[in-house]
Image (cartoon, rainbow, N blue to C red):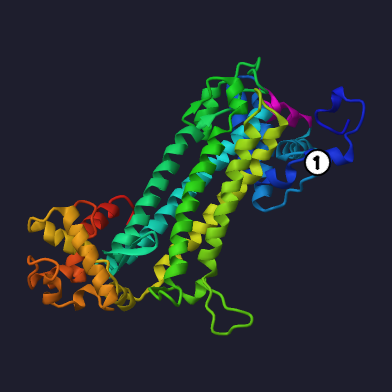
Amino acid sequence: MSKLWGGRFTKETDELVEEFTASISFDQKLVKEDLQGSLAHVQMLGECGILSKEDTQTIQQGLLVLQKKAENNELQFDVKHEDIHMNLEKQLLDEIGQTGGKLHTGRSRNDQVATDMHLYLKAKTEVLISLTEAVQQSLLEQAKKHVETILPGYTHLQRAQPVSFAHHLMAYFWMFERDKERLSDSLKRISWLPLGAGALAGTTFPIDRERAAELLGFERIYPNSMDAVSDRDFIAEFLSIASIMMMHISRLSEELVIWSSQEFQFIELDDSFCTGSSIMPQKKNPDVPELLRAKTGRVYGNLIGLLTVLKGLPLAYNKDMQEDKEGMFDTAETLEGSLKLLAPMLSTMSVNSENMRSAVNTDYSNATDIADYLASNGVPFRQAHEIIGQIVLYAIQQKKYLLELSLDEYRKYSPLFNEDIYQVLAPEHVVNARNSAGGTSFQQVRHQISMAEKTVKV
């Protein structure tokens, strides 16, 4: 039989079945990890005396040849050999002869593929942590320049209270800090080694799984062989973390789109991150943040897809689990590409401080400070709130803003108003008055920037 597992079968696999069940079209992405795992496995087999020194060296040399070919994109894969494991085993046999067949001693494709995915996610997670930090550094760069830039803060997409632009940006910094912590923490679960668990029940050979873990840089082995081959929690966790990260990226992207619109004109994205229109020459479209918003959906889809695949599976390995890889690859590549674009896009954006300040001067976002002003003079806050609501209504009817009302107009509503009300209503005062820990005052923003600098590599 042409199949490496074909001894029990009397018929060739139907061609349509081969095409339908083969995974080599996508799991060839694991070629580096598969060879890495095999090199550790054969070294362990040799050290345990399961393979002779001569066979161990022959297999190692063959694997190193394949590794070199893989680095040079010289390996050829065939759907007839189903997956990355069988393709590489076939090429190893071609390279060194029947000795190559001894490599699979003490393991199964079930623990082999799980090991490959652990190795893949381990390396990819470390890259994503670094890229997340680069986004944080871009946010920090802009924040340092705009501590005293004031813009309207929003709730319900309605102007609420003026804030430091740096404060607004730093909100995203801390979101990404939590994302970075989640990624770092997930490495604890990714660093469980399934290799040596066999198909589901372990192996009769006296292997040393702890040694294999040491060779591959894993923190521990799975204590249960059935769990080892059927666990995909680490992928589901990665997809969940990635979904949260893409949600954060999407929220920031939405604000970049809004802020760069003609209606806001708070920022301008660099030309290198925008495109034009094929019919309207005046257009400058924020395509990158728009696509970042959209790609969030595909990452969510990959998470739901895997959870659906896993939800009814009995132990241990099932062919359904072949569907775990494409979503993982797609999510890792989507998130990596998104972070790579987001960092320079943030660093190169221009901030229109004057337009932000002008917006603050033409709204009623300083109204709360009048209520605080009255409350500090002994008026119960709820009563003060009602008085200010009446003043705002009056100002709207008069087509004036709060700083444009005269002292006499204020005193119609309370005799407690004095000239210092205009100082209280000044945007800088409104911002700096919020000097509680984590607040938007310039002092507090500089403090959180100082805190943030300690969490990233500057």
Q: Is residue 440 above or below residue 50?
A: below
Q: Residue at x 9, y 57 (%)?
A: 376
Image location of residue 417, percent across then percent down: 9, 68
**Which quadrant of the figure has residue 23?**
top right
Q: Nearer the viewer, residue 362 or 3?
A: 362
Q: Is residue 132 above or below residue 194?
A: below
Image location of residue 276, percent across then percent down: 57, 78
Q: Amino acid at mark 1?
A: Phe
Q: Residues within 10 Å of mark 1 (few under 14, many from 20)?
A: few
Q: Residue at x 14, y 73 (%)?
A: 422
**Which quadrant of the figure has residue 154?**
bottom left
Asked whether 95 falls inside the magenta stretch, the response is: no
Left or right? Give the position of 447 relative to 125. left
Q: Is residue 407 above or below residue 342?
A: below
Image location of residue 374, percent across then percent down: 12, 60
Magenta residues (range):
98-109
Q: Is residue 442 visible?
A: no
Kindly report the secondary structure that dominates the magenta region of the rendered protein. helix
Q: Residue at x 22, y 61 (%)?
A: 368
The C terminus appears in which quarter of the rendering? bottom left
